Image (spheres, grey):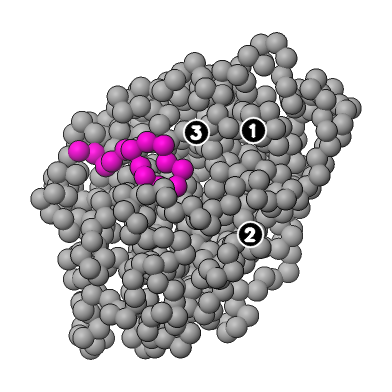
Amino acid sequence: MALTLRSSTSFINFKDSSSLKTPDDYSGMVCFAQIRPTCRLRARNSMQEAPISRERPSLLEGRKNEQGEKLHGLPAPHSQNGSRVPVFVMLPLDTVSVGGNLSKPRAMNASLMALKSAGVEGVMVDAWWGLVEKDGPLKYNWEGYAELVNMVQNHGLKLQVVMSFHQCGGNVGDSCSIPLPPWVLEEMSKNPNLVYTDRSGRRNPEYISLGCDSLPLLRGRTPIQVYSDYMMSFRDRFKDYLGEVIMEIQVGMGPCGELRYPSYPESNGTWRFPGIGEFQCNDKYMKSSLEASAEAIGKKDWGNGGPHDAGHYNQFPEDTGFFRRDGTWNSEYGHFFLEWYSTKLLEHGDRILAAAEGIFRGTGAKLSGKVAGIHWHYKTRSHAAELTAGYYNTRHRDGYLPIANMMGKHGVVFNFTCMEMKDEQQPEYANCSPEGLVRQIKMATRTAGIELAGENALERHDAGAYAQVLATSRSDAGNGLSAFTYLRMNKHLFEPNNWQNLVEFVKSMSEGGRHTRLPESDTSRTELYVGFIKGKSEQKINEAALV
């Protein structure tokens, strides 16, 4: 299925694969020359990222930028052509074991050596809250991550670390299960309203509800305080590596680490692509906020738990009174509710990023935040799947510029997925437009004056996917990419053809996405290995395949 998820939500099943295309389903979009096994190529980082000025607009600035039917069109090209785009590779979800140790250190060492030879900039790892603070409040175990940081440094690579405050397990591509810390789950059992709840009362334990951000419900601490203490502990433990080895901290702000509501949970078949999802505003703290907002404008009856006609997880927009073409999403009530729902999400992100900004200020590490690539039903007027996730983006309203402005206020890089997807590869009935969505994100980040980084949404090794990333990485229209993180390192990546495609992709990205064909022979006396690697290097590739 055409999803944009990277890691984790709860209760997922893997059986809905009827619309999932494999790499073999796509024809290659770039013709790579045959490369001899002994050929060597080098991707030198000769060009630095072009600096991007950051404005610091207010949180809600840009929320009224309605421009009718042409709202999502792009302005004139932005000038960053030729800039190199560093490539990172995501490490396995279980890089650190449940016991807190580095998993398979020998294979990891070989993998990092191979990635370095391919010219990648570095790797990304999830720092799971459920592993680090599992033994009790304020009891942190960073030892497995410390071993990884040292290993990354020894290979001359850089590291992106995700502050993963969400549950891992059961989602597309997940290979392990890491729940929230046991002591947090205990508090959830005592107070079920700590988690997001849909209209039917289904509760989702993958992330703490933003409705209780500022309430001391976690043994005397608020969720924001808990996240802040966690980030401070990380900063203090790794202060000597920040800005030198650890170059980026991606701050988790919701399920899958993304700033969104868990509106499309796949657990037990609850949601299937391309369903519209459901609003998640029925825990008592969210309901209390909605009631107060409705009363404040003299519309008390608007505070009764969200729209009653928004349908169910697996319906289509036209099946509902709220999301259909002329539905109540575009009524006075609809505007009120969607403004409240999306603003709560913005404020949640603002609180966490403000804390992170203060904690990591002066360390030399960048901050980033991730937004989900919800591309299904993008071609409809209401953009229903985006609305239930908290993105107030419709045919007449830009829902991503307010998010970009909020991130810009804190100097945060906007990280976005589905960079490898093309509209023509999606099922027509789902009204998808990943390309249109990416264009809109590029425009929003350009307007906000912030950096844009990208990821692929699904594991792909084919030339067609890489070619699409190369195309979206350029700044021909809107922002170009400041970095790209490839999902994900596993044994399939080190298969000869897949490995060759990765090496060629890294080479092209090092040339600003302009280089789409490699020569047959080595003409530059370079050090980047292509094809089969001889001697000890070949042994390391084989060891890496054990990851």
Q: Nearer the viewer, residue 519 or 116?
A: 519
Q: Is residue 530 left or right of residue 161?
A: right
Could you classify mark 1 by the number of other residues whose Cα lies within 10 Å: few (under 14), some (14-19), or many (20 or more)?
many
Mark 2 lies on residue: 425
User: What segment carries the magenta color?
Assistant: 169-182
How many other residues sit within 10 Å of disc 3, few (<14), some (14-19) or many (≥20)?
many
Instruction: Give the residue number, with chain letter if any, for mark 1.
Output: 120
Magenta stretch: residue 347 in it? no
Of the residues under marks 2 and 3, which one precedes in the sequence? 3
Is residue 73 positioned above or below 120 on the image?
Answer: below
Structural distance between the alpha carbons of marks 1 and 2? 28 Å
Residue 207, position as x, y percentages in the image: 30, 51
Q: Please state which amino acid type lies under the numbered disc 2.
A: Gln
Helix, strand or loop status at disc 3: loop
Q: How far separated are the C-alphas under marks 1 and 3?
A: 13 Å
Q: Residue at x 63, y 80 (%)?
A: 70
Residue 386 lies in what quarter of the image? Answer: bottom left
Q: Which residue is mark 3?
A: 91
